[in-house]
Structure formats: C-alpha cells, structure tokens
Amino acid sequence: MSSSSSIIASLTISYEQIFIYFGIPILIFGLIGNTLNIIVLMSLETFRQNSCAFYLTIMSIVNIAQLITGLLTRIMSGGYSIDWTQTSLFYCKFRIYVFQLTSFISFSCISLATIDQYFATCTRERWQQWCHIKIAYRLLMLISFILIIEQLPGLIFFDQKKIVSAVGNTTICTVTDTYFIQFNNYFNYLILGNLLPFILTFSFGLMAYHNVQQLAYRTIPLVRRELDKQLTVMVLTQIVYNFITLLPNLILYLIVSYGNIQDLIIKAQLNVVNAITICLYYAYFAVGIQF
C-alpha cells in the first residue's frame, strides 16, 4: 500500500471514529436535555403563558425530531456504514424532508424568541402587545405551514441513484433535478438555514440586550423584570452558541463548494473536518437552552 493510500485509509477511520465517539454522546445528551427543557417549560405556569417560552418549547420538541432523523442516521452511516437511505426509498425521501423541516422550524423558533424578547423589553407599550401567547401560536403555525409546503419538492426530487464503479455498484440518496440542487443549496441551506437566522438573531439580540440594560431604570413589576431578564439571557446565550456551532459548517461548505479541490488527501482531510463540523452542527440541536 502506498503512503498516500495509507494516509487516506487512516483519515477514513478517523472520520468514522468521530461520529462514534462524538456523535453518540451528543445524541444522548440532546435527547435527555431537550426532554428536560420541555418538562420545565410546560410544568411552570409562568412559562406556559409566556410567548418566548412557547417558542423555546417548540424548539426543544423539533430538536428531538431533528436529532433522531438527522444525527442518528449520520452515526449509523458514518460510524457503522449502515445507511438506511440506501435500502429504503421512503426513508431516503422522508429523512431529508424531516431533517430540513425541523431545522428551519428550530431556527424560526429562536429567531422569533429573539424578536419576542426585543418587543417584551422595549419601552413602547404598543410593541409589547405583540408578546402574546395567542399571537405566538398563530405566527408559528403560519410559518410552519409555509415551511411544510416549501419543503414538499424534496419528497419529489430526492431519490435513490445507482453509481457504477470498478469496486461495485452503490446506491445513494441524492437529488435528481439540477435546478432543485441550486434551489436547495442557495435558498434552503444558505438563506433559510444560515444567513436569515444569523441576521435576525444577531440584530434583534443586540437590541434586546440594550433594552435589558435599561430595565432597572423603568417602573415595572419586579417579577416581570426578572422574567424578562432570565428569558433574554437564555436567548442571548443561545445566539452566541448558534455562531459557535453553526458557523464552522457554513465555512467548510463554502470552501468545498467553491474551492475546486482535486487532491485526494486534501479531500480526505476535509472529510474529517466535515465530520467535526457536522457534530458541532448537531450540537446546536442537542445543547440549546438547557436548564
């Protein structure tokens, strides 16, 4: 075996080990943590009647679905070479649909929670009226309905495809339409999955932080003041965590998409880095707002 082949083989093993030793703990911690989040947020009446807490509750619910359909499949395929999307056409379509839908709903929830806390802490009473649980129900239902419809093309254009090579025939789950590839990469991944949540959470998060600094100088009930502080700190912590976990995957995506890399060893090295950024990506859904 040549030195380059041995390096690539070693990097392939590292790729598999990352999903096993990092992916499994993230999955377990995420399922337990999000479940505890739901229990706490739904058991306390103070949170049940709060629109920001409602967004965080729904975010924890969809995060569980995201971890099961997304990370669990990654662990089985990347760590144990068991790819359910290759053996089942239904799962090939269903997995990507649920993966993207739950991702975008989760990003929508944290964006809405950030905007909600900005309105809740601002001085204008007219804007504070938008922080109502009924408005939160209707707004999230509308956004979820739009996302459900917007993701339907994935059920059509994701399909199983046979790849013929010297080693043998391999079945992969991939997009079968060129135009949908562009739409999925640029609109779904870049805009809905990265740029829009980053812009909304960062801008409204800064304004909410500024408002919280002024709470001590305003005449409002102590209980409400402390609740607004607590929820705003939770949301701002989540925003910082978003950048740490999601940004590396976006950067690597841009490098791979526009780098035109041909060297096999560099590709293998990028695969290892990709495994790390994928684990970080799923850590967003696993850790989130923990109590």
Image: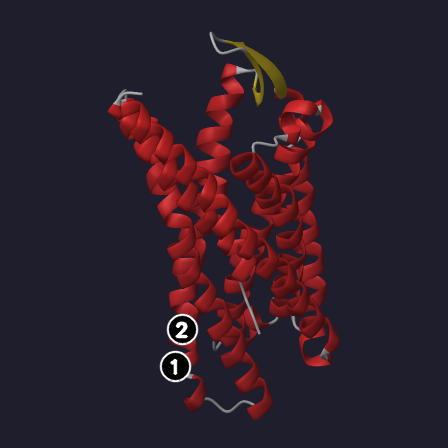
Do the CB atoms of the residues marked 2 and 1 lie less than 8 Å apart?
A: yes
Which quarter of the rendered picture does the N terminus lie within? Answer: top left
* Mark-to-mark CA distance, 2 and 1: 6 Å
Residue 141 at least partly seen: yes
Residue 258 seen in the current view = no
Above-or-below relation of 252 to 123 = above
Neighbour tally class for label 1: few under 14, some 14-19, many 20 plus, Cα within 10 Å: few
Q: Which residue is mark 1?
A: 213
Res 8 quadrant in image: top left
Q: In the image, is 142 to the left or to the right of 272?
A: right
Say if 213 sits above or below 76 in the image: below
Give the camera-side residue of 221 and 14. Answer: 14
Look at label 2 and name its amino acid.
Tyr
Residue at the image point whose x is 49% and y is 44% from the top: 19
* Residue 84 locus on image (x, y percent): 66, 30
Near-viewer residue (219 or 165): 165
- Image position, residue 280 (x, y; %): 44, 51
Identify the image quadrant of the C terminus.
bottom right
Above-or-below relation of 234 to 5? below
Q: How would you rate the neighbour count of disc 2 (Cα within 10 Å): few for under 14, some for 14-19, many for 20 or more?
A: some
The spot of residue 156 in percent (x, y) is 66, 21
Question: Please, what secondary structure does the residue beneath circle 1 have?
Answer: helix
Query: Which residue is under mark 2?
Result: 209
Residue 69 horizontal/vertical position (percent): 65, 42
- Secondary structure beneath dot 2 equals helix
Residue in the foreground of this view, choosing between 149 and 175: 175
Q: How is the image coloured?
A: secondary structure
Q: Please, what is the three-letter code of the amino acid marked with disc 1?
A: Gln
Residue 90 is tagged as none
Residue placed most toward the observer, 163 or 225:
163
